[in-house]
Image: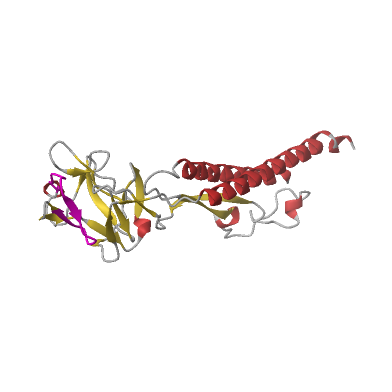
Amino acid sequence: MSSKGIFTALSGAMAQSQRLDTIANNIANSNTTSFKKDQQTFSEYVTALERPPDVIQVPRVPASIESFYDMQGGDRGYVDSSGTFTNFQQGQLRPTGSTLDMALDGKGFFEVLTPQGVRYTRNGQFKIDGNGNLVTKEGFAVLRDGAQDPAQRRISVDGQNLTVSRNGDIYDNGNLAGRLSVVEFANLDALQKSGNSSYTLKPNFEEAVIPATETSVQQGFVELSNVNIVDEMTDMISASRAFETAQRAMKAFDQLDEKLVNNVPKT
């Protein structure tokens, strides 16, 4: 019987280990511009639900405990890591004074063009490349709104006198150069991280991208990470203690098995 319990404790330890990895990644990115923290989710996995019995099972070993009451696997439950989800809570806006820094106040995302296609980001630390195009720190083109080919939606400016309104209109030396493409999503669960502070749509997840209606552009600001160090450290302590508890449970089950094997046959 104890051998069943040790696997339950093991699954709990593995789940807490994954939780610690997620928390550590959040802490490491606490100073990353516009970073959104991840959170681990868990659920209970009961083996009896995997394959419910459809016939009456006759005990094969009459002398066993299971012969008196067949649990049908109901006594074996495990911790199942359901994965992580991203918390898109708004981060604080910090003023920089740079005309090329733009933060989003709301739930929208900038559209940028990468070698892998259009991606979405909230990191508005932009610059101007050698061709006069507005790009991200990684060199990805920032797109203006429009329905045409994304490659034709680059924003060309000289950057000498750049002004951006709250709705995303870009004025270069007083002339309208276009409007930043800021989009929103009805369901943020459709997004997944794709590196470089950008997001893409999940595979086989159809989600309409709509123009932003509840987001404003704040020129001269950047959005800080939404990671709260105090909360993350508290969660790390909690996960560490849960991990240690699972380890002690595994050790106790192991000692119990040892006594059953070595001591019980001698009595």
Q: Nearer the viewer, residue 61 or 222?
A: 222
Image quarter for residue 158?
Answer: top left
Residue located 77% across and 37% down the image: 255
Image quarter for residue 130?
Answer: top left
Instruction: Estimate the x, y position of residue 215 in percent, counting from the top left.
Output: 29, 62
Query: Going by the image, does 48 lie left or right of 94?
Result: right
Instruction: Estimate the x, y position of residue 17 in percent, counting from the top left.
Output: 57, 42
Above or below, 162 against 167 in this view is: above
Residue 266 in view, yes or no = yes
Instruction: Estimate the x, y position of residue 30 in percent, counting from the top left.
Output: 45, 45
Q: Nearer the viewer, residue 74 or 42?
A: 42
Above or below, 217 against 264 in this view is: below
- Colour mode? secondary structure
Residue 155 within the magenta-colored segment of the rendering: yes
The span picked out in magenta is: 154-171
Q: How many marks?
A: 0
Q: Nearer the viewer, residue 106 or 128?
A: 128
Query: Going by the image, does 149 lie left or right of 221?
Result: left
Magenta span dominant secondary structure:
loop
Residue located 25% across and 62% down the image: 212
Query: Going by the image, does 209 lie left or right of 36?
Result: left
Residue 90 within the magenta-colored segment of the rendering: no
Instruction: Estimate the x, y position of residue 46 in percent, counting from the top left.
Output: 59, 55
Residue 83 in view, yes or no = no
Where is the C terminus found, in terms of image quarters?
top right
- Kindly give the residue lying farthest to the bottom in the view shown: 213
- Kindly give the residue lying farthest to the left in the view shown: 175
Residue located 59% across and 53% down the image: 47
Q: Nearer the viewer, residue 107 or 51?
A: 107
